Amino acid sequence: MPSAVELRDITKRFPGVVANDGVRFEAAEGEVHALLGENGAGKSTLSNILTGLYRPDEGEIVLWGEPVSFASPRDALDAGIGMVHQHFRLVPPFTVAENVILGDHRGEGKKFMVHPRRIERNVAELGKRYRIAVDPRARIWQLSLGEQQRVEILKALYRQARILILDEPTAVLTPQEAESLFETLRVMADEGRTVIFISHKLHEVKAVADRVTVLRDGRTIDTVDTGSATPRSLAALMVGREVSLAERVERDGEIGAPVLEVRGLWAHGDRGGDALRGVDLQVRTGEIVAIAGVAGNGQRELAETITGMRAAADGQVVVDGRPLRGGDAREAIRAGIAHVPEDRLHTGVAPSLSIASNVVLKSYRGKQVTRGPLLRLRAIRDHAASLIRRYDVRGGGPELPARQLSGGNLQKVVLAREFHGDPRVLVVASPTRGLDVAAIETVHRYLRDAASSGVGVLLISEDLDEILALADRVAVIYEGAIVGEVDAGATTVEEIGLLMAGGAG
Ligand SMILES: Nc1ncnc2c1ncn2[C@@H]1O[C@H](COP(=O)(O)OP(=O)(O)OP(=O)(O)O)[C@@H](O)[C@H]1O
Ligand SMILES: [Mg+2]
């Protein structure tokens, strides 16, 4: 098949890092080509170069045999390159259809008169053709992350992208949603488009991609056919050593008295209606309890209500036998509840602040951080530097703005801060979403260590492999209620999957 895109010796430097170091890459028409590499390996940088966001310091981009150079993302768009970013770029108060046409300089968006009905019809048709189900009239803020992603894909297709880059698209999807995304990608490839698919999930790479290129430390390590690769061989290429893929491990430490109790908890959702409908839950010290469920069944609202970010409509959250008033994040922190939210870029960190500021965000009233009205800057920096070392945050020192970190390293910053505050209860949502296999190994170890040291861990995850590897008990949430509870050591993915779909418990 003819080559659609070829990158020749691309180098991109940032102060202190060579993000891409002579990268070579080639993808054909009609191919799904995966890009694999550890956190910070340079995948997003490479796609940003291909989409005209960054200019390479060295090297050449060749599209359909012609060398090109992009002065801006618009040039890349005009050349037929579309991108679905790791962090979405949609306008929350606007509708799906409005977001799809926004900034399009060829179609409806340019005309003085827009015809909302016609745009909505076009968007709906496009959705049908590519098997992307989304309501054109819904507003972005009402959508789950999975649905928002579909909008990003529609947006690229609307602009007639011939090469589509998806940066970790399945990180925000349930297994079922991922399955339907793969169908969409296949339809696109069969039409002769080129799909560049960035993912950390090795079995997905194997399932959807024809070939895979592996990056490590900014360099191309190899390009292989996925047919002849195994998840294990890919992991080894990626990390440069053998790694243990997530497996169930017995933990030390005892399970004690209930530390977190949720009693008859009701909460309203953002779209009106009841997001939580009488949730009862218990997490004991030293225990990891997982909440499994398809995204959008109340997980986010549950985490937010427990951590005081959302007021309960009814019911109680109790820590160490003491009921919280609720609706007050500071009260929850004081009670010993730490929170690793699912949306780490917006809720998890302050993107423009430094890593150092981000790790002290929650302890700014403590005496390690302030002396009287003054911030102890040196102490903060030292503290940040030691956390950066301990949690293996790669990409920069304490002064680096958090938004410049790669996705996985950003997650490590959030984890470092939350683990460090000596919590009684840890509420973690999708803690390894977007992390590479080596980082997952690390995070899982931290979660097990936290439990072993007596913390009660509430793990909210859509990743059943992760749940089965970590949890003692699994509670399944469906339409805002716990519909079943199983012992993680004695259950199967199928059993949980059935409960997740609202099946009999
Ligand atoms: N705008 C920037 N300024 C400074 N450094 C950057 C910038 N963007 C990326 N980097 C650095 O370049 C390196 C590669 O980052 P990149 O985001 O491309 O990694 P990645 O492979 O996408 O990782 P992940 O899997 O975690 O998303 C990292 O060390 C990162 O910290
Ligand atoms: Mg990335």
Image: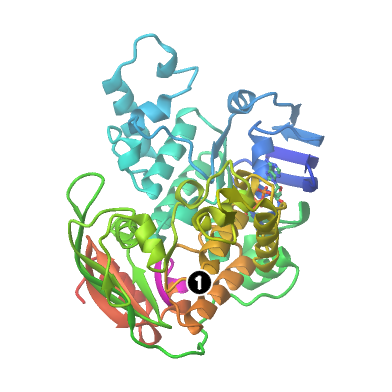
Give coordinates of residue 161: x percent, y percent.
Answer: 54, 32
Left/right placement of residue 63 relative to residue 146 reads right
Colour scheme of the picture: rainbow
Left/right placement of residue 240 relative to residue 87 reads right
Q: Is residue 79 above or below residue 257?
A: above
Give coordinates of residue 203: x percent, y percent.
Answer: 54, 65
Location of the N terminus by quadrant is top right
Q: Quadrant of residue 338?
A: bottom left
Q: Which residues are magenta?
A: 456-466
Please report the residue visible at 42 percent of the width from the left and 18 percent of the height from the top.
Answer: 109
Give coordinates of residue 218: x percent, y percent.
Answer: 76, 51
Please report the residue visible at 56 percent of the width from the left and 44 percent of the height from the top.
Answer: 351
Is ligand 1 within 8 Å of the beta carbon of the residue shown at mark 1? no
Residue found at the far top of this picture:
112
Q: Residues within 10 Å of mark 1 (few under 14, many from 20)?
A: some
Q: Is residue 305 visible?
A: yes
Q: Is residue 206 visible?
A: no
Q: Is residue 167 above or below residue 222?
A: above
Give coordinates of residue 14: x percent, y percent.
Answer: 76, 42
Asked whether 55 or 381 is in front, the reply is 381
Q: Is residue 355 above or below residue 389?
A: above
| Residue on which disc 1 sits | 422
Asked whether 220 or 350 is in front, the reply is 350
Q: How many marks?
A: 1
Please report the residue visible at 22 percent of the width from the left and 57 percent of the height from the top.
Answer: 312
Location of the C terminus by quadrant is bottom left
Asked whether 309 or 499 is in front, the reply is 309
Residue 118 part of the magenta-drawn span: no
Q: Amino acid at mark 1?
A: Asp
**SS at circle 1:** loop
